[in-house]
Image (cartoon, rainbow, N blue to C red):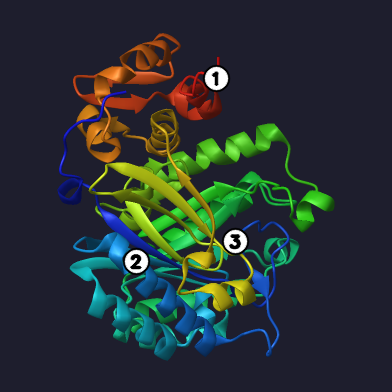
Amino acid sequence: MNKNVIDLQQVLPLSLYIHLPWCVKKCPYCDFNSHEFTSTDFKESSYTDALIRDLEFELPAVSGRQIESIFIGGGTPSLFSAEALEKLLAVVRANLQLNPDAEITLEANPGTAEAERFQAYHEIGINRLSIGVQSFDDTKLSALGRIHGADEALAAIQMAKDSGIKNFNIDLMFGLPGQSIDEAMTDLNTAFEQAATHISWYQLTIEPNTVFYKQRPSLPVHDAIWEMQTEGQQLLSDMAYKQYEISAYSLKDKQCRHNLNYWQFGDYLGIGAGAHGKLTNIETNKISRFVRHRIPESYMQKAGSGDVIVEEKLLADDDIVLEFMMNIFRLKDGFSSSLFAQRTGLAVEELQSLLKIAIERGFVEMENDEIKPSELGRNYLNELLEIFLPDTE
């Protein structure tokens, strides 16, 4: 494929992801890089200093570029004090060009102790919360191994609103052990009553390397899960929550800007244990991916040097095409051909033969410059993506 001549610094947004890896209890369905802690494991000050060293090491790679969003994920980031996060954000602001209107999201669990910190988080500039509720049913929460109850979840949401953080997401799952269709809809209706600006609503899936994978719970049958999905999507639409991604629904203008940048193949710097990053070298037009040490102790020892990176991959053109499609086809509205050229640096004409196959199979719709997955393509995303797999012959 031929590279286009594009000023990527002007058109390629940059986000910052910060991973805080500890949690009180590892949930049996969770396959994220999270670690249960004891009082001796949780080293807030040392870890914060390591994040700062890690960030300072990466500064030359993002010099002159503006940060459009920050996402602090985990683990349970709300275990960290506002003082620790303020110290970190101060270094970000002092060394990077942070958009004055930047979206700054913190993932939070609904435990009362964490929720009591929401006011302090708001005061240091955090303007969006993602609250991991999962269900408002105590029985379902117990089955999921969650340590909070429904009352705590409702109290945490109220604390978020009282803190001044009006923009917040509620994470909800469906297809839970023993869950009926009515119970799934009740969870959604409760989220509506809380005036969430964004709802992440997704099916419980059993992932390898989790407790549920080894001790599989009894889940609803396929037809019931499908009905939960379709009824839930209709209910979300009726309540003015627009689906813009496979499992993301928002009120008008309340999409998660940070996640949109991922899905639209923007750049992101990732710091913290196990964090992933994707950066474009503005001078060479080359795209690389990076992965950091997963274990917090190893990460803290190596942060501040190249040794913190355990994997670095320079993407070939075929890899770029596949990765772009893997991300962009998660979005219901798809993409424009100009966006493809801007985010990849590749000539869009090279896509024509592959897009033709996808259109002929009914997976993709194209009108003028706009390309988006059809309903069939969204339902059979893996089959759609297979079209864009690199030719290994």
* Mark 2 or mark 1, whichever is nearer to me: 1
* Mark 1 or mark 3, whichever is nearer to me: 1
Say whether marks 2 and 3 touch (CB < 8 Å).
Answer: no
* Mark 2 or mark 3, whichever is nearer to me: 2
Q: Label 2, on which residue?
A: 70
How far across and down, in percent of the image, does residue 223 sit? 67, 32
Q: Label 1, on which residue?
A: 392
Q: If you read the primary sequence from the N terminus, does the residue marked by circle 2 or circle 3 appear first?
A: 2
Between 248 and 8, the residue placed more toward the observer is 8
Location of residue 65 by image quarter: bottom left
Location of residue 265 by image quarter: top left
Say whether marks 2 and 1 touch (CB < 8 Å).
Answer: no
User: Dot 1, crowdedness within 10 Å: few (<14), some or many (≥20)?
Assistant: few
How far across and down, in percent of the image, does residue 5 sit? 16, 34
Please name the residue shown 23% across and 19% down the image: 367
The C terminus - image quarter: top right
How far across and down, in percent of the image, does residue 288 sit? 40, 47
Which amino acid lies under the numbered mark 1 shown in the image of this protein? Thr
Seen in the image, is 118 located left or right of residue 339? Answer: right
What's the CA distance linking mark 1 and mark 3? 44 Å
Q: Label 3, on which residue?
A: 135
Circle 1: element type? loop
Regarding residue 354, the answer to whether it shows in the image is yes
The N terminus - image quarter: top left
How far across and down, in percent of the image, does residue 22 sit? 61, 75
Please name the residue shown 58% across and 64% down the image: 293
Which amino acid lies under the numbered mark 2 shown in the image of this protein? Ile
